[in-house]
Amino acid sequence: MEISRPIHRTLRLLDPRLSDKYRDALHAELSQHRVFEKCEELRRFSIQGTWSAHLEDIYHQLDDTITKSMLSAECSIKKVFSRKFAWSPKLKAAVQAYRFWRLKLKQANGQHVSQEVLIRHAFKGGIPLQSVTNTDVSYIVQIIKLSYHNLTDMQSQHANL
């Protein structure tokens, strides 16, 4: 299989969002195919000096599996970008905080919102976990307004961030 030039490949190692997704997808693929256990087994045979032609075939199959897993993980990540704003960790945290408070308002108004989703947005937005249990609607509305203003300020400074 021909390896395409880096400009045509999906993986961009300078973007932590994509490299983290790639790493997680690759780890899942390798775990599914039990690559780590097979590598350890081949290493044991190599150290013992009992290497054979059969083990060499297994080694090549394992190499093919690793290569296919890497390409599969690369294809599984999608491009995540905004055409309007340059990406930055601070802007991402501001977006996640605003999303958290909007979801928290929905939950406070009686709509179903998963606790796991709230905790994930709180973690990514840098919000203390005790805020997850707050149900005061007037407080939440005030915080939504503040987080929206913070978000718009971050968006206006996106090139500097």
Image (cartoon, helix red, strand yellow):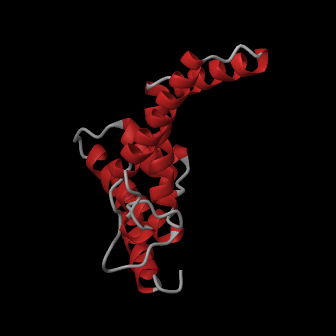
Q: How many marks?
A: 0
**Residue reaching furthest to the front:** 53
Q: Nearer the viewer, residue 92 or 5?
A: 5
Q: Nearer the viewer, residue 130 or 94?
A: 94
Q: Is residue 107 above or below residue 142?
A: above
Q: Nearer the viewer, residue 141 or 38?
A: 38
Q: At x 71% / y 13%, what residue is drawn? A: 50
Q: Does residue 63 appear to the left or right of 80 in the view shown?
A: right
x then y, percent, for residue 21: 45, 49
Q: Is residue 88 above or below residue 108?
A: below
Q: At x 33% / y 53%, what residue is drawn? A: 137
Q: At x 69% / y 16%, what residue is drawn? A: 45
x then y, percent, for residue 24: 48, 42
Q: Does residue 79 appear to the left or right of 52 in the view shown?
A: left
Residue 3, by quadrant, is bottom left
x then y, percent, for residue 31: 49, 28
